[in-house]
Image (cartoon, rainbow, N blue to C red):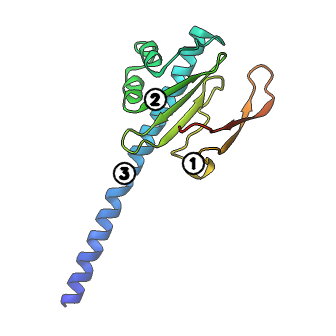
Amino acid sequence: MKNHVFLVLLLLVVVSSSSFCAPLSEVQKREYGVLESAVTFSSDKMIGEYGDAIPDGFSAEKFMEFVRGRIPKDYYETLKKYRLEIRPKRSYYLLFIFDTLSGSLILFDYSCTPEVDGPVLLEPGKYDLNKGARLILPIKLPQNGDTCNLCLTLYDKI
C-alpha cells in the first residue's frame, strides 16, 4: 500500500511539474516573437528615415532614441530588456541582441533585409558563433528578388 501511495504521489509531482514547464516555454517563444517583430518594425522605421545612408557613428543608444515613439510601446519595452549592439555598415547596419543574464547572442539582423536574419535562440544549432566562425546567410535582394549568400566572419568577440 505504501508503495502504491508513493507511486501516485511521484506521478502527481511529475505530471504537475511537466505541465508547469510547458507554459514557460510558450511564454519565452511568445516574447521572442515580439522581439523579432520589434526588430523588424524598427528596421523598417530606420530605413524609412535613413535609407541606405546609415551614419558611421550610429550606436545602440542612438537607435533606441530614434525608435522611441516611432514603434509601438510594447516593442520598445521589449527591446529595452536586452543589450543591443549596432555596427553601422554605411548602407545598412548589423544589429546584435544579447541576453542580459548570460551575455549570449540571441538574435542578429541586417537592416537591409525584410525579416530577422539570425534567430539564434530559436535555431541554436544553425549558427556557429565562435571567434573566426563563418555565418553564411541566404539573402533575397529587394531590387530584383535574386538570392545571394552573405558571408560574415566573426573576428571580434560578439
Circle 2 SS class = strand
Quarter where residue 48 is shown:
top right
| Residue beneath disc 3 | 23
**Numbered-mark total:** 3
| Residue beneath disc 2 | 84
Instruction: Determine whether label 2 and label 3 are within 8 Å by CB.
Output: no
Residue positioned most to the top: 49
Q: Image check: 139 left or right of 43?
A: right
The amino acid type, in three-letter code, at marker 2 is Leu
Q: Image check: 76 left or right of 158?
A: left
Instruction: Determine whether label 1 and label 2 are within 8 Å by CB.
Output: no
| Marks 2, 3: nearer the viewer | 2
Residue 123 badge: 1
3D distance between C-alphas at marks 2 and 3: 27 Å
Q: Position of residue 141 (x, y in %)?
A: 75, 25
Residue 113 badge: none
- Which badge, 2 or 3, comes first in the chain's sequence? 3
User: How many C-alpha atoms fall within 10 Å of the one at disc 3: few (<14), some, or many (≥20)?
Assistant: few
Circle 1 SS class = loop
* Residue at image coords 72%, 32%: 139
* Residue at image coords 41%, 15%: 68
- Which badge, 1 or 3, comes first in the chain's sequence? 3
Q: Position of residue 91 (x, y in %)?
A: 67, 16
The amino acid type, in three-letter code, at marker 1 is Glu
Given residues 9 and 113, the one toward you in this image is 113
Instruction: Determine whether label 1 and label 3 are within 8 Å by CB.
Output: no
